[in-house]
């Protein structure tokens, strides 16, 4: 080959070098560009997983409250530690939820740290922590939920009457009402409470629902006590500094140190308008103190009288005349 041929070949090689360099740069750009895209996809997956758990945790908790209360009602046996029982039950439900993410290659852990009474007696506070790992993305978050016990989709029954009356004849359920039969009379007589017979066939609300008549004084400020009667007919519960909270009710306590709830226990229709006093018609009083209340006729019909027996403290609370 002559000298001219060598020159041409050298020039061809020099022209190829930039092309090779450009291909290498482009390949590197494609590789490095795919990393942020992968991280973005992983972040989206982690975010949606976190929100899904955060959205489902209150639903699972409400289901746990409901089932736990019904289990106590069926047995009549109080829980030894309601907070631990609810916590463990909710943890099992959360673990079942997170299993599906593991199958999708997402490492998810949700640990229930505590279950306790909230500042609102119609809510339970659930504290938890979430850890999610997907590829190079790690997400950790602490959560605190104040979860309602009065969701109509997960109605929670009041367990304490079934615990207290288990050994005194038992009670039955009709619709959304608890029917005591003779059990409440037997319970009160076992404690030597005077005029216990007033509560033969008494009733109280089954499902915990918050009373809409707020402030509570408005119960007694309506014409012929219409608000009070509507409250009783609908079976509402009220905030109470003396009544037990939901979690303590599961343990069979009528009173506790937390801000709790109370409901009226309603004597059956009566024809006796002369009985001046009987055990106070507030559930935590009936099941704990048994102190007396004074008769109050709140409604009547052609066959008899509807009466409550309330001490002056509860009369004042509900805007009713004191004696």
Image: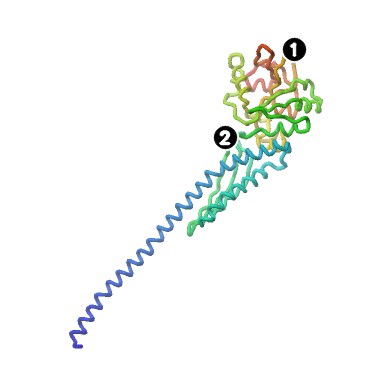
SS at mark 1 in the image? loop
- Residue 192 occupies quadrant: top right
Where in the figure is residue 287, as x and y percent of width and height? 74, 29
The first of marks 1 and 2 along the sequence is 2
Name the front one of labels 1 and 2.
2
Going 65% across and 13% down the picture, which residue do you hit? 301
Q: Which label belongs to residue 274?
A: 1
Going 27% across and 71% down the picture, which residue do you hit? 19
Q: How many marks?
A: 2
Q: Quadrant of the N terminus?
A: bottom left
SS at mark 2 in the image? loop
Q: Which residue is mark 2?
A: 151
Q: CA distance from mark 1 to mark 2?
A: 41 Å
Where in the figure is residue 203, as x and y percent of width and height? 69, 25
Q: Which label belongs to residue 142?
A: none
Going 72% across and 33% down the picture, which residue do you hit? 162
142 sits left or right of 80 in the view: left
């Amino acid at each position: 080959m002559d000298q001219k041929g060598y020159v041409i070949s050298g020039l061809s090689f020099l022209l190829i070098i930039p092309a090779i360099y450009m291909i290498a740069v482009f390949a590197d750009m494609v590789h490095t560009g795919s990393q942020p895209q992968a991280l973005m996809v992983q972040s989206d997956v982690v975010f949606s997983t976190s929100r899904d758990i955060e959205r489902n945790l209150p639903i699972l908790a409400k289901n746990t409250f409901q089932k736990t209360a019904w289990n106590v009602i069926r047995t009549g046996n109080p829980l030894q530690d309601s907070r631990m029982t609810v916590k463990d039950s909710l943890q099992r439900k959360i673990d079942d939820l997170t299993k599906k993410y593991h199958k999708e290659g997402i490492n998810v852990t949700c640990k229930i740290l505590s279950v306790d009474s909230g500042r609102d007696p119609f809510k339970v506070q659930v504290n938890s922590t979430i850890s999610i790992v997907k590829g190079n993305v790690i997400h950790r978050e602490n959560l605190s939920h104040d979860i309602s016990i009065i969701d109509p989709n997960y109605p929670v029954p009041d367990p304490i009457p079934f615990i207290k009356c288990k050994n005194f004849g038992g009670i039955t359920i009709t619709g959304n009402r608890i029917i005591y039969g003779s059990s409440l009379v037997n319970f009160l007589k076992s404690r030597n409470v005077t005029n216990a017979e007033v509560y033969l066939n008494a009733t109280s609300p089954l499902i915990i629902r918050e009373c809409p008549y707020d402030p509570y004084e408005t119960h007694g400020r309506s014409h012929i006590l219409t608000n009070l009667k509507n409250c009783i007919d609908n079976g509402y519960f009220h905030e109470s500094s003396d009544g037990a909270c939901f979690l303590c009710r599961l343990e069979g306590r009528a009173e506790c140190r937390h801000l709790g709830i109370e409901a009226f226990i309603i004597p059956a229709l009566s024809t006796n308008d002369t009985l001046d006093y009987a055990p106070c018609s507030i559930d935590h009083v009936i099941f704990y103190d048994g102190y007396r209340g004074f008769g109050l006729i709140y409604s009547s019909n052609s066959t008899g009288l509807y009466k409550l027996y309330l001490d002056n403290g509860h009369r004042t609370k509900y805007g009713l005349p004191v004696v």
